[in-house]
Image (cartoon, rainbow, N blue to C red):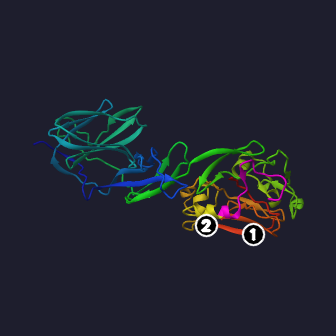
Amino acid sequence: MQSFKVFVIGLIAAWVCMGDIRGIVTLADTSGTVPIDSALVVLMQSGLQAVTDTSGKFSIPITTIGYRNKISRTIPAPIAAIIQSNSLHLKLPLAQSLEIIGCDLHGKLFMHLNETRNSGTFSYALPRKGDGIYLYKINVSGKAIILKCSVFGGVWRAMSGAADIPFGSTKTSPVAIAQRDTTSDTLMITKNGYVPIKIKVTYADTNWIAIKLSAVIDPMVDGDGNVYKAVRIGHHVWITENLRTTKYADGTSIIFDTSSTSWANSKASIFCYYGNTTNADSIKKNGALYNWYVIDTAHTKNIAPKGWHVPSQTEWENLRDNTSSNGKSLAAQSGWSSSNVYSAIGYDMKNNNSTGFTAFAGGFRNNFGDFSGKGTYGMWWSAIPSMTAEGMNSYLYYDDGGMFVMSNSKCCGFSVRLVRD
């Protein structure tokens, strides 16, 4: 019997961990009883994906390839293989189970095929890839070989010295392969009409992962004509940006005050931008800062357009209570100072904003007219009766994972969010 020298994927050389990443996707404003079907679930590193079924469930079979040491030995050849004319050609002497795995040198999978074949010769068209070096691992009835190849100008070629086994040949060549120990990935869930989210998972997460998607709501338009996206969280619909209008809903202008002297302890209805910036991108991202008198519920003019209002303290508390990780699930994935505190907003920010609320650390202006807190604090007014001595606000802090409530001088400048009636 012909034999050749190949890399055997075994206990010492490498390992293959098989399992399923499983989960269920439901609507965010329910207790998990309304499933979302046809949502695309993708493991961003490996490229593996699935689509949720009518019950909102998905399952992604995982193959994690890792290589420790290189060993070689002579084994009977169960298969002949060659890469030629942009195709992988296989010759099977017997009817056998066949698995083909294609990956780059970082272990990222781009091809995974399982099937049973009768004896014979078979060809598989290779996918179009960018220039580089790639590996194909071919498992046949428990035996494995690796083909090392390159792509240049869209053409696949066997590499010199690779374990590319021509039909009927006894060629022997060891294969140099990169080390790779893939243990985690990022799960991205998307569907039209819903806010996409990303969740970090490990390949050991084989239990059901509960995922909630927030539906995208019709946008809100302010007195200036600015359009704001909105999202449902719990039982309320919130705009996903800080308000930046310069006018009340009836078109009346709000006083724009850049002077720290006139701002200090003013009881007029005034607004400004952080640091008195004129940068349009910064204004859109962080919104405006308003003193409490602009949102006074006893005011004859309303900053919120019809169908919307400044949230009460109770509504802010409901928002907090309807999020799994409080501030972290509300905070944006950028714009916050970095933190070393585990679960803080500024720690591992790519895991922020699972609700789509997208809170930035826009800072504030104190009652003396000084700006502070950009990158570290996000602060939002609550609507409270005008007879109270101080205003109430909710805030997020980069070095903590919670949402908090405090009272402040009504002369402070804080951000404003709106909630639908």
* Numbered label tally: 2
Q: Position of residue 56 (x, y in %)?
A: 43, 50
Above or below residue 406? Residue 186 is: above
Q: Residue at x 31, y 48 (%)?
A: 176
Label 2 belongs to which residue? 402
Q: Is residue 279 left or right of residue 75?
A: right
- Find residue 407 and name its label: 1
In-front residue for pair 208/159: 208
Q: Position of residue 22 (x, y in %)?
A: 39, 54
Residue 180 is at least partly visible in this image: no
Highlighted magenta segment, given as a residue range: 296-316
| Type of the residue with mark 2 | Gly
Q: Quadrant of residue 149?
A: top left
- Residue found at the far left of this picture: 1
| Type of the residue with mark 1 | Ser
Above or below residue 374? Residue 160 is: above
